[in-house]
Amino acid sequence: MSEFRLTQISDTHLGRRFPGLIANFHRVSEHIDADRPDLVVNTGDVSFDGPTSRDDVEFAKSLHDALPVACRYLPGNHDIGDNPTAIGPAPKPPVSETHREQFCALIGEDHWSFEAAGWRFIGLNSLVMNSGLAFEAEQFDWLASEISRASCRPVALFLHKPLFLDRPDDAETPDTSIRYVPQPARARLIEMFSRVELRLIASGHVHQRRDFTFRHTRHIWAPSAGFVINDKRQDRVAIKETGVVEYRFQPDRLEVRHVRAPGQVDVDIEELLAQMGAQ
């Protein structure tokens, strides 16, 4: 395969009680149907609240199953709970093995790798990092094996949380500790990937569209496919809009397109909070 086309969607936050998010997903589905990439990757928060609603997870999977192309998934904090961090309040809810197993049973693998168009693709469960769960160590062992097999191929890494804002040594703060891969797992990942030709890190989580290069690695933050978080509730560091990201991989070449599906709208988080309050 000389070219591999991949569409990244993220933070779909699907649940039956949120018609605006469902409508946005349908617009994205129609766009994917028209474009027909080789693969769709959802980089997490597939469901609105997996830890408290199995139905959210089942409903989200049913909508993805209707897509006309193959899908891979990675869990977000709304799917399996959040990372413990060295600073800031304890996450609510914390990541748990029970919710990770539910995600794997209902959605699919929470970490994976494959090769296409001369690239090695790796997807990681970033929410178990710093958790102390047995799977955290298992995934790091698995990753070490995958990295040893990468050889000289360029590597594309997909995960829910961005590694950092601007630099690997960005300080963690109480306000941002849950936004990025926490330390010391972040430093361990960076050291492990220093052994290969890491060309791309694709993430979601922040609900802001961002595209920058640090050293020789391009960092893509996919926006939410479902909703935006207004400036009163979240500081603005990039572009706040709904959308998707499209990639074309060729041997030693990468093209990125930032797009919005026709008809996709910027549902504000206040609309969702109002719907939750009305329950």
Image (tube, rainbow, N blue to C red):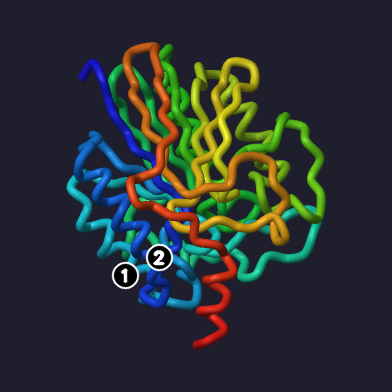
Q: Quadrant of the N terminus?
A: top left
Mark 1 residue crowding within 10 angstroms, few (<14) / some (14–19) / many (20+): some
Image-quadrant location for residue 13: bottom left
Q: Earlier in the sequence, mark 2 or mark 1?
A: 2
Q: Are marks 2 and 1 in contact (CB under 8 Å)?
A: yes
Residue at numbered disc 2? 14
Secondary structure at badge 2 equals loop
Give, as a three-letter code, the residue at label 2: Leu
Q: CA distance from mark 2 to mark 1?
A: 7 Å
Across and down, in percent, residue 103 comes to 40, 62
Residue 55 horizontal side relative to residue 139, left or right: left
**Front residue of 12 and 243:** 243
Secondary structure at badge 1 equals helix
Identity of the residue drawn at 49% across and 51% down:
224
Across and down, in percent, residue 165 comes to 69, 37
Identity of the residue drawn at 52% across and 45% down:
204
Across and down, in percent, residue 42 comes to 39, 48
Across and down, in percent, residue 238 comes to 64, 39
The answer to whether residue 139 shows anywhere in this view is no
Residue 194 horizontal side relative to residue 178, left or right: left
Residue 253 horizontal side relative to residue 216, left or right: left
Is residue 149 placed above or below 37 in the rendered structure? Answer: above
Please give the label number shown on residue 142. Answer: none
- Number of callouts: 2
Is residue 213 placed above or below 262 in the rendered structure? Answer: above
Please give the label number shown on residue 59. Answer: 1
Is residue 142 placed above or below 71 in the rendered structure? Answer: above
Identity of the residue drawn at 32% across and 64% down:
106
**Front residue of 262 and 84:** 262
